[in-house]
Image (spheres, rainbow, N blue to C red):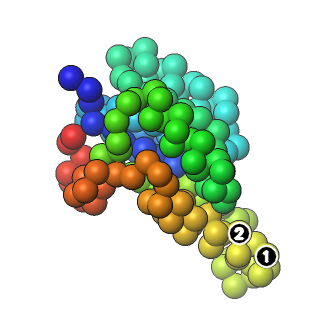
Amino acid sequence: MTRALAIVTGGSTGIGHHLVLALAEAGYSVAFSYRSSPTAAEANVKRLQGRGHSVFAAYFDVGKKAYVETFHYAVRQWHGSAQHLLINNAGIQTSAPLLDLTEERWDLRSVVGTAAADRCRDCRYPARDGHHRRQRSELRP
């Protein structure tokens, strides 16, 4: 039986890494993206696969539509079915207080926050009806 598929954007470090781990431990096959931490992504995949989990990682920039489509195509080739759960975790950290951000940096943060949700949702690889809106307490596949 194929495991339910969860996709996590920004899954190589921080909260995203912990989400990938929790979902894998909960029985999901997990595909995650990374943009700036390939070494951490590779280490996470190796560690989780060593524990018997089904995990896939690939570079993709949520700010670019072509990357989103390529990522979802690669995930479909790897897993073979539609996602059950999508967690848009990708983000850009800034070292400045919110009110001190330049307009350009603010726009970049906004694009990353909304682009992942819009582009992943509208991708030609949609989630199955009713399977992508789960609460944190419902992480079991």
Residue at 21 percent across and 23 percent down: it is 1
Q: Which mark is residue 43?
A: none
Residue 7 at what x, y percent from top left?
Answer: 42, 44
Whether residue 34 is visible, yes or no, is no
Residue 112 to residue 110: above or below: above
Residue 27, located in which quarter of the rendered image? top left
SS for dot 2: helix
What amino acid type is highlighted by mark number 2?
A: Leu
Residue 48 at what x, y percent from top left?
Answer: 43, 23
How far apart in space, not on screen, are marks 1 and 2 (Cα)? 6 Å
Q: Pointers 1 and 2 in contact (CB under 8 A)?
A: yes
Q: Which residue is mark 1?
A: 104
Q: Looking at the image, which is closer to me, 44 or 132?
A: 132
Toward the bottom, the furthest residue is: 99
Residue 49 to residue 32: above or below: above
Q: Which mark is residue 108?
A: 2
In the rendered view of the protein, which quadrant contains the C terminus?
top left
